């Protein structure tokens, strides 16, 4: 297949690009500045210039790539700017889908997130609605809702709701923002989490090219509150564990659907991935 990976130079996009090429696909990766991405060229990808906020730029990239499928891995997280990331989800996805529809591209795989489900009992499967857009997470929720709604305009779509990414290159790592915060004693966790090791993002994303349309949670097997995962995380990154940790609020996500589709995580528990 000819596959356009939007955001091919990212923490998920780069290993994904390498695996797609290893499996014999022709990959066209996007970048605002193709000359700054030698690793994509070295992997064997064709790199096209694309500014996701500029519809003409997105249309040009789609027209040049002539893809059979698009994998949407666009994020703006380098500066921990959640507003910028929400805007990219809204505007970038809108432009990507409009360009796909114009040029007749009918397969879209979209990266989303699995930690915005409405409160309730038990693990949240894909039928559970997302929370209302209110409070500190309001803009993030607005961005995700808009992104997923727009992605559904492509009939042959798969929305992958990843768990909280941890491991090399992520916020949850010894070199990441939350690792540094833990060492500085200013990180107390974010409630009940369903994690996903960065090494477990590629296989389900490639497999999703052949999955039925719909939403799929891609998370590990062990949702946990901060009283469980935060001490392990702090030991991993070299920080001190905060005192008075609680089980946390919220709920984890179920990965039953992904497993029924054949996905098996390399890291079924964050305990393995955060062991160092």
Image: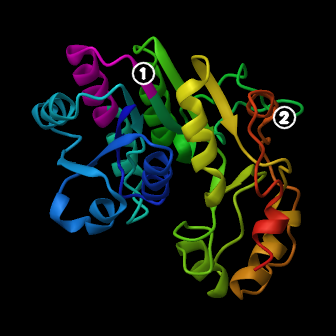
Q: How is the image coloured?
A: rainbow
Q: Which residue is mark 2?
A: 123
**1 vs 2, front mark:** 1
Kindly identify which residue carries mark 1: 107
Q: Magenta includes 101?
A: yes
| Mark 1 or mark 2, earlier in chain | 1
Residue that appears at 30% across and 29% down: 67
Q: Is residue 191 visible?
A: yes
Considering the numbered disc 1 on the image, is that residue within a helix, a strand or a loop?
strand
Residue 70 shown left or right of residue 58 in the figure: right
Q: Position of residue 142 (x, y in %)?
A: 46, 32
Pick the residue in front: 191 or 213. Answer: 213
| Residue drawn at x 76%, y 67% as measured from the top left | 273
Magenta segment: 91-108
Quarter holding residue 244: bottom right
Prevailing secondary structure of the magenta residues: helix
């Amino acid at each position: 297949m000819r596959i356009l990976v939007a955001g091919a130079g990212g923490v998920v996009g780069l290993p994904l690009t390498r695996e797609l090429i290893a499996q014999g696909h022709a990959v066209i990766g996007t970048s605002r500045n193709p000359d700054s991405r030698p690793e994509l060229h070295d992997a064997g990808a064709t790199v096209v210039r694309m500014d996701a906020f500029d519809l003409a730029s997105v249309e040009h990239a789609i027209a040049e790539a002539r893809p059979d499928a698009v994998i949407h891995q666009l994020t703006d997280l380098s500066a921990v700017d959640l507003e910028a990331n929400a805007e990219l989800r809204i505007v970038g996805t809108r432009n990507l889908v409009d360009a796909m529809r114009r040029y007749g591209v009918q397969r879209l795989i979209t990266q989303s997130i699995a930690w915005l489900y409405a409160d309730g009992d038990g693990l949240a499967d894909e039928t559970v609605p997302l929370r209302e857009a209110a409070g500190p997470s309001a803009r993030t929720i607005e961005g995700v809702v808009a992104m997923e709604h727009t992605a559904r305009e492509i009939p042959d779509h798969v929305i992958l709701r990843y768990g909280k990414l941890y491991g090399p290159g992520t916020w949850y790592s010894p070199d990441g923002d939350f690792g540094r915060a833990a060492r500085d004693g200013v990180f107390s966790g974010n409630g009940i989490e369903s994690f996903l090791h960065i090494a477990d993002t590629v296989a389900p994303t490639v497999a999703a090219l052949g999955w039925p349309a719909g939403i799929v949670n891609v998370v590990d097997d062990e949702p946990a509150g901060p009283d469980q995962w935060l001490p392990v995380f702090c030991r991993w990154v070299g920080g001190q564990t905060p005192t008075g940790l609680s089980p946390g609020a919220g709920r984890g996500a179920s990965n039953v659907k992904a497993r029924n589709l054949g996905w098996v995580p390399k890291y079924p528990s964050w305990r393995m991935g955060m062991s160092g």
